[in-house]
Amino acid sequence: MDLEFGPQYEDFRREVRSFLDDHKPKKMREVGSKEGRKALIEWLTLLIEHGYWARTIPREYGGYGAEPDLLETVIMDEEFNRVGVARGMPAQGPSMLVPTLLEHGTEEQKTRWIGPTMRAEVMWCQGYSEPGSGSDLASLQTAARDDGDDFLINGQKIWTSSADKSEMIFVLVRTDPDAKKHAGISYILAPMDAPGIEVQPMRTMSGGLGENSFNQVFFTDVRVPRSNIVGKRGEGWKIANTTLKHERNSLNSNGEGTLVRLMKLMNQEIANGVTAMASPVYRDRLMKLQARVLTMKHHGMRMLTCSLKGESPGVAGLVAKLQNCQLNFDMSALAIDVMGELGGLYDHTKYERDRGYWQTHSFFSLGLIIGGGTAQIQKNIIAERGLGMPREPKPAKA
Amino acid sequence: MDFGLSEDQQLLEETVRKFLSDQVPISKVREIRDAVERDREGGCPNDRKTWSLLAELGVTGILVPEAQGGSNLALLDAALVSQALGHAATPVPFLTSSVMAPIALRELGGAETEAWLAGTAKGSSTFGIAATEAFSVREGAGVVMDGSVLQGKAMMAMDSLEADFILLSLGKDRLAVIRGDADGLSKARLITTDLTRCTTELTLVNVTPEVVYDDAGDGISRMFDAGRIALAADVLGACESMIEQAVAYSLVRKQFDRVIGSFQAVKHMCAEMIAELEPARSLVWYAAHSFDSMPGEATLMAAHALAHLSEIGREIASVSTQVHGGIGWTDEQNLHFWFKRISSARHMLGGPEFLRNRAAELQGLVPAA
């Protein structure tokens, strides 16, 4: 056990702090404004110049070109979190497409897409799930048929976050209808303004139509050059799995910040003349949650150490998404409970607490329990890959 | 930055586990259990033979300074031994004689403690702990100084029936050491569901202590911190064993022409258990590490670690038994040894509700009355 980072890393931490002191307030105000896209691009470009975003992406693809160093990543995340600024842009392009292109893309694809994606010049959405293919993603039916030098795509995608704000989509399609289900899938890049693509926003439990940017995407004879395929034809399933791995990693945020916010609420929320914190019942629930937050925090440190040493964490490496998403949901549940009869107030109505943060957080964490591989699929993965338990046998064909 | 076990620690863990699986398989625990069950009057389950072999292995003096013949290792090392003992459900007084007593004695200092520490390291003498009343007083229990002698009753004393010495709490900030064969001390075994641990009621009438430590608040606090962390590790090890047994059983037991481990209902039970257990391992490691490296955090971490392990422990003990179905409920299947060990740990050094309230107090979250 050695929880020190060492002098070289503490120097790095000072650099990051001083950068944030110099740049944070002004830039963030602009990025948060309505005409934010231009400011966002400038902010991300500045971050890349200093190596705080796209840090390990090679320079020729628009990155900063540093050697991978997990501790530097941890320090950057800690420092940005400390001042409440997102490090870069937590969107599906940078977190899912870019790692996939780095691993499977052609030279031309990497040069063309990685830099603009990291700078938010091109926004991406992910076209995986379909109405009939959720947990059983590999049964997807959206088809890409050969037509000269192009694919013609027909079908429908669902749960497509940000489709209405994206320039591009990375989409899984069936290129070989006769192959076995996992083998007939390809991974294709398509522009969202291609004729035949129609985006239909969906209203979710957390708010108004389109507010969370959740959509269905319909494809009718959408023409895409065959060179837009990533990896080989029929390898889309394998490639998508590397992407999903990136998604699960990116959903692993721990709850320390949320817990601090919850404690603040409990110290402020007063019913019958006493704070929620003064109630032994609520306090006991809070302490239970704190133990879980501490557990997941140190679990994260252990997993980080495994990565640093190149050791496999075994089954321990498969549990964080399942545990953290439920933990977040449970924290918002306590927050809403301490508000009591005011817990249902929403949409910036009178007496609403924390501008509706906890209600949104509750809906959103429920969404994350389901999204990115449901809790039940996670449990299958843990049991099968982690504990060596057999897959459920397929039912005999009738 | 290295959050994990050193090579030496991994080796220690392997060595102790190998030793226990060779020397104290569950069939041996069952023999011990049968013997103490036959002898209601005597019947301390702590196994002397195993204890002397552990002493030869150097485990008993793990927290004792080298000058007194110990190996002067860290609480994390002791927690790994404790975890292995929980994994094997071994009846030995490690928590008391090798963790709580040495930590208290080291904290208290004084010439007399050196011989006692040397004795625990060698395995030639053991210490019981009678400190339940420091956090929970029931049935009018409590031992007090009456002039120069001790009077009163200590309930649920740990490992005290056959101990050479007993560390007694007198209220919240005094500790006394008495001899196990002191005049005026009577010991009555209390039969508990968990027969891998030794629980005793002590009655003291005009007992002359070997020594009394005033202002021992810090010593008591450190003793409980170390004890809670080591006990959490014991629960962790017991849970580990129960999950291993549940998964192994699910892969051989067939119903409806399939191994039951291929049913999602059973897989999800096992996945939920391991998803709780693996992160909890990191919590216990960190708590143990904090005891030596960040003592300011240790009391809070000890309270959280034991409370959390008590909660997930109860669930894992129940669910892993359920995976076995009816056979899991029988005496023959052995699971109950771990189930009961986990259950008794839940209240030995403060139950989860008490510990969480303690955690809140430590953070200033409990308003002054």
Image: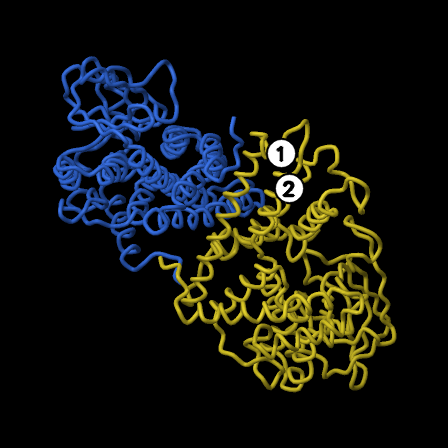
Chain colours: A yellow, B blue
Residue nearest the viewer, comparing A168 with B126? B126
B235 to the left or right of A331: left
Figure check: A278 above or below B304: above
B245 to the left or right of A257: left
Mark 1 highlights which residue? A276
Residue A265 is tagged as: 2
Q: Residue A344, position in %: x, y?
A: 76, 38
Q: Chain of mark 1?
A: A
| Marks 1 and 2, how far apart at CA | 8 Å
| Amino acid bearing label 2 | Leu
Q: Are marks 1 and 2 in contact (CB under 8 Å)?
A: yes
Figure check: A221 above or below B248: below
Question: Disc 2 on helix, strand or loop?
Answer: helix
Q: Residue at x 47, y 37 (%)?
A: B359
Question: Disc 1 on helix, strand or loop?
Answer: helix
Graded by Cα atoms within 10 Å as few (under 14), some (14 to 19) or many (20 or more), the crowding at tag 2 reads some
Residue nearest the viewer, comparing B276 with A314? B276
Residue nearest the viewer, comparing B12 with A337? A337
Q: Chain of mark 2?
A: A
Graded by Cα atoms within 10 Å as few (under 14), some (14 to 19) or many (20 or more), the crowding at tag 1 reads many
Say whether disc 1 or disc 2 marks the residue closer to the N-terminus: 2
| Amino acid bearing label 1 | Ala
